[in-house]
């Protein structure tokens, strides 16, 4: 397995398979940090702050496997296919990414082979190894203010053409402003993982977008993961995937 893709709790027994495509802000030094200063490399343009922590907590609560990227989405966005220009963005919000400008076809292929292909293979292997029909849940975070506009959505519940789990989940969420296909949707190209791994196999699937100011601290992350686990369990019971709420008896290491 490539060091650019990781698996947490690979032997998890729950049908939910968690995915975190934008888990890390890491950039290998030989990419010269893409010409960005340190604050930008740690900002939301480079990764989804808090998403991996919430995903790991969900993996522990469910006893689920979690597949995650180990490098910045500015090097390659693992939630985009290689043919998409946005897979290696030359601009993000109002910022130019110097190290991504005017890349050759060969350079783009190198990025895809280094970052995307190991991630895609890793996720495919975890799904194939599942002893039950998997349910794909991807975990993301989004910035509260984008291009100067404040976002009121607190939890985005995203789907592509298969709405089953999203529909059920929207009916279970309480205490948060939960919106369908916000702040992004399929037209923005954000449902690639679902299209690639869930739709062809008719696996239940959903993409979760949590506003990042709600998961800044460890206590916020724990609270959010607890709520998400409860709502997902209720939704899966409504869809007859689970008969009873699942509480893992296995001790999953931190």
Image (cartoon, helix red, strand yellow):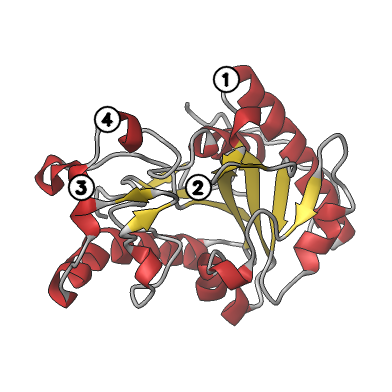
Labels 3 & 1 near each other (Cβ < 8 A) = no
Up-down relation of residue 180 to residue 7 (above or below): below
| Circle 2 SS class | strand
Of the residues tagged 1 and 2, which is closer to the observer?
1
Q: Quadrant of residue 201?
A: bottom right
Q: Which residue is mark 2?
A: 66
Instruction: Measure the alpha-carbon separation of dots 3 and 2.
Output: 28 Å
Instruction: Measure the alpha-carbon separation of dots 1 and 4.
Output: 23 Å
- Residue at position x 41%, y 45% in the image: 45
Q: Where residue 238 sits in the image (x, y, percent)? A: 89, 58
Mark 2 packing: few (<14 Cα in 10 Å), some, or many (20+)? many
Of the residues tagged 3 and 2, which is closer to the observer?
3
| Circle 1 SS class | helix
Instruction: Measure the alpha-carbon separation of dots 4 and 3.
Output: 11 Å
Q: Which residue is mark 4?
A: 38
Of the residues tagged 3 and 1, which is closer to the observer?
3
Instruction: Measure the alpha-carbon separation of dots 3 and 1.
Output: 30 Å
Residues 170 and 40: in front is 40
Q: Where residue 251 sits in the image (x, y, percent)? A: 56, 29
Of the residues tagged 2 and 4, which is closer to the observer?
4
Q: Which residue is mark 3?
A: 34
Q: How many marks?
A: 4
Q: Which residue is mark 1?
A: 218
User: Which numbered disc, 3 or 1, marks the residue that appears first in the sequence?
Assistant: 3
| Circle 4 SS class | helix
User: Which numbered disc, 2 or 4, marks the residue that appears first in the sequence?
Assistant: 4
Q: Is residue 75 visible?
A: yes
| Circle 3 SS class | helix
Instruction: Measure the alpha-carbon separation of dots 2 and 4.
Output: 28 Å
Q: Quadrant of residue 245?
A: top right
């Amino acid at each position: 397995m490539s060091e650019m893709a990781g698996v947490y709790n690979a032997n998890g027994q729950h049908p939910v398979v968690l995915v975190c495509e934008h888990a890390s802000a890491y950039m290998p030094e030989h990419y010269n940090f893409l010409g960005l200063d340190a604050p930008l490399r740690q900002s939301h343009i480079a990764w989804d702050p808090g998403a991996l922590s919430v995903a790991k907590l969900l993996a522990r609560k469910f006893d689920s496997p979690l597949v995650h990227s180990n490098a910045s989405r500015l090097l390659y966005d693992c939630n985009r296919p290689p043919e998409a220009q946005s897979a290696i963005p030359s601009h993000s919000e109002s910022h130019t990414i110097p190290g991504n400008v005017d890349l050759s076809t060969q350079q783009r292929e190198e990025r895809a082979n280094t970052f995307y292909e190991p991630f895609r293979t890793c996720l495919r292997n975890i799904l194939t190894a599942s002893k039950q029909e998997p349910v794909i849940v991807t975990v993301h975070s989004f910035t509260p203010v984008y291009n100067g506009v404040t976002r009121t959505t607190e939890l985005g519940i995203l789907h592509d053409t298969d709405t089953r789990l999203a529909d059920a989940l929207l009916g279970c969420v309480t205490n948060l402003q939960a919106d369908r296909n916000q702040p992004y949707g399929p037209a923005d190209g954000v449902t690639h993982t679902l299209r690639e791994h869930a739709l062809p196999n008719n696996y239940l699937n959903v993409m979760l977008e949590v506003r990042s100011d709600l998961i800044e601290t460890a206590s916020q992350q724990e609270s959010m993961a607890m709520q998400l686990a409860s709502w997902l369990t209720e939704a899966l019971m409504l869809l007859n995937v689970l008969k009873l709420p699942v509480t893992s008896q296995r001790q999953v290491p931190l």
